[in-house]
Amino acid sequence: MEDLIKLLNEVKPGVDFTKENDLIGSGILDSLSIIQLVTRINDEFDVEITPLDLVPENFQSAETIYAMIQNAED
Amino acid sequence: MTYAAYMNFFAFVGIAFLVYLIVPLKHRWVTLLAAGVVFYLVLNGFLTAFLAVTVVSVFFCAKQLEKLQNGFNAKKKELSKDERKQLKNAVTNKKKAVVALAVVINLGILVFLKYYNFFAGQISALWQVCGFSGSMPVLRLLLPLGISYYTLQAIGYVVDVYRGRCAAEKNLGKLALFISFFPQMTEGPIGRYQDLAPQLTQGHRYTNENFTGGMTLILWGLFKKMVISDRASFMANTVFKDYESYSGTMVVVAVILYTIQLYTDFSGCIDIMSGTARLFGIRLADNFRQPFFAKSVAEFWRRWHITLGTWFQDYVFYPVSLSTPFTKLSKASQKHFNKFFGAFVPTAAALLIVWLGTGLWHGASTKYIVYGLYYFLLIMLGMLFEPLAVKLFAKTKINRKGKLWGGIATVRTVLLVLIGMMLFRAGNEGDFFNMLGMAVTKFNVTDLFSKQLFELGTDGPDFLVIFIGVVLMLVVAILKERGHDVLKSVATGRLPLKWAVMIGLIMAVVIFGAYGASYAPVDPIYAQF
């Protein structure tokens, strides 16, 4: 989880990702930052996030993103 | 649209609405399908055959996709992990081939009918530059109404079935209704099967809320289209047609009026169609969300023609960005540059495809390619300078989320959008650059007080009506931005309020609507795409 928070801060600095739980609704993550994030996740976590995973529910908070990564690892 | 065209449309809607209420609840969707068929046949004649090809091809492709997936699901429990993986890959490849078939058929029809002559012209020109004689023949091609909208909606449905986001429709008639729901046929919005199809096929009872909500939306849309848009079009048309005869100031005023015209035309027509759908108890997807309050160009496109933007996002940008070649590109960029560019380069490459597609979707000309590239460039610059902007804001301690910076960012975005609108309306990219040059070098404030301003088709009283209309729209938009939906409040409010607003809008359209002998009819702009 710490690695993910670090990565999120690199992609979108200045956001407290431990507290935010409406990243899509509040406009913090848009489609561009999602692709930048997913490209980095695929690379650094060695998983394969596919377009099928790119639904708003998976990107609402750091926790939902982390759950998506764990799901992809399985 | 002429006055008679509006009357014909609303008479048609009235008849369809009455029949819808008479038919038993279970079969009400058939009324909507029949209305769509009549609507399309009347407006399109034999070109309806193209729509039929889309419906049938998409229907069978989606069924095949589901069959392949069900076959895999039935077998997978009996297989070992490796066998399961092997079968999954084989089934996925077959499913991809089916999706490709649906895309080739439907995009093929669209590309051929809409772009053949453009590309043939480009290829012939290239051919002749290379010293060869001869050229590709120019064909007389007719474009079916709404093909740019229903094709994207149909492809979206097949991809959603492929992705498992919805089940394949088993009833050909119900799928035909989803693709040809008549209020959407001219200008969208581009619907998603999961959201729209259940609403269309489920019978809806009459409710006062739907009726007044629908009527208010229709009247608000008519107000935007007939009172503001059609009136603003006159001066814009005069100046854009012969811009070299006017000053830079007139060019700037014409661009502002055209922007008002386009927004009120497109959003007005969408309101009329959403209101029409609402009469039948159906809610269409939102296509606009106060676009001129956006603080960046990227945000503007998340608020303007939303359903086209999200379509390109879900069915082009995401899959292209995460495809194997782009993933390889990302790794190569990371190796040669740094982490930031590792993510930036593939995103930029995917966005280039998206913006070329968005530009070309609007029409077959180099002007629209330049239009797409203009927004691509602006978004790229925004992304490139974002890290620098973050540092600058931190150093200067300027509150980026504060009202002052928000206002500056909004004005900057509006100016950039106005330049985009100039390109969108100009005859070609050459005219655009000339007009932009005039707007910058030949702008003179005193021209705003000259008589000429009121002699270009839009006179003094017209300007006053446009001004009052825009202020009214602005108030409604500000309230909506703050969470107060005025139109919704009217629809659900007390009876005197409902009637006062509806009668007020009817009076405004009847008294101030730009129709009749003095006004040339203006067709909906986005219907031509």
Image: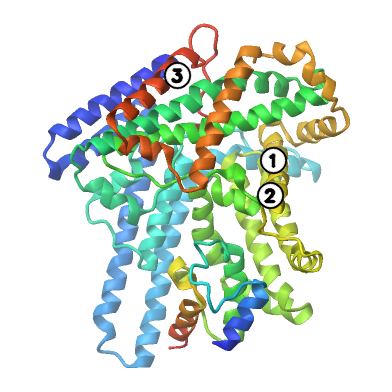
Chain to which mark 2 belongs: B
Give neighbour class at mark 1: few <14, some 14-19, many 20+ (Cα, 10 Å). many
Q: Amino acid at mark 3?
A: Val
Q: Residue drawn at (29%, 43%), measured in percent from left and top?
A: B177
Residue bearing mark 3: B509
**Which colour style is shown?**
rainbow
Give neighbour class at mark 2: few <14, some 14-19, many 20+ (Cα, 10 Å). many
Disc 3 to disc 1, C-alpha distance: 30 Å
Are the two marked residues, 2 and 1, in contact with CB atoms closer than 8 angstroms?
yes
Residue bearing mark 2: B375
Element at label 3: helix
Looking at the image, residue B343 sits to the left or right of residue B2; the answer is right
Element at label 2: helix
Disc 3 to disc 2, C-alpha distance: 35 Å
- Same chain under badges 2 and 1? The reply is yes
Q: Indicate the position of residue B473 as horizontal and vertical percent values.
A: 53, 32
Chain to which mark 1 belongs: B
Q: Residue furthest left?
A: B24
Q: Is residue B400 above or below residue A69?
A: above
